[in-house]
Image (cartoon, rainbow, N blue to C red):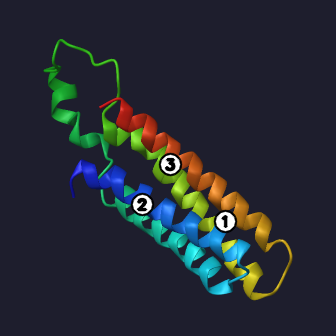
Amino acid sequence: MTEVFLYTFPQWIVFAALFGLVYGWVEDKKAFRLIGLACFIALGLFSLYVILGDYLAPGKFLTPEEVMSEELNDEILNEAPIEAQLLPAYLSFMGSAILAIIALLLDWLNKKYNRLFMVLAGLVALFGFFIVVGAVRSI
């Protein structure tokens, strides 16, 4: 998995999920709302895979052998690597998935608070989206 895939794939999924939620809400089409929530849940599962799959691990950038032998480069970077900057975004995508699961359950039970959790899931996903945008600007 390349680093480009780490920041482009979530952006497309966030757009697809938000489109499904907004269109389903405005046109009162439950299927599109469910597709939007499913996109948030899929993005959360992808985020869990990336975090647990060692794609954002700091071990790739600084090995214990380098720390023990103090063979670090003399130059100190002012910015963290792109993978490290993406970690908060992936955590927010996982939070969005949790909120989407709650919204999905409330929608299935026909409770009126499902729209609140849909909006919260969208806002948390947008927060992650803007973290990704900020990280991409630093490249």
Callout 3 secondary element: helix
Q: In which quarter of the image is the N terminus?
A: bottom left
Mark toward the viewer: 3 or 2: 2
Q: Which quarter of the picture shows residue 132?
A: top left
Q: What residue type is labelled 2?
A: Trp
Q: Which residue lies furthest to the right in this view?
A: 112
Q: Quadrant of the C terminus?
A: top left
Instruction: Give the label on residue 129, or none.
Output: 3
Callout 2 secondary element: helix
Residue 55 percent location from the top left of the image: 29, 53
Q: Do the residues labelled 2 and 1 touch (CB within 8 Å)?
A: no
Q: In this view, does 36 lie above or below 90?
A: below
Residue 126 percent location from the top left of the image: 57, 51
Q: Is residue 4 above or below residue 45?
A: above
- Of 49 and 132, the residue lying toward us: 132
What's the distance in space between the residues labelled 2 and 1, CA to CA?
A: 19 Å
Residue 86 percent location from the top left of the image: 41, 44
Residue located at (43% from left, 55% from top): 11
- Pointer 1 or 3: first along the chain: 1
- Of 17 and 101, the residue lying toward us: 17
Instruction: Give the label on residue 99, or none.
Output: 1
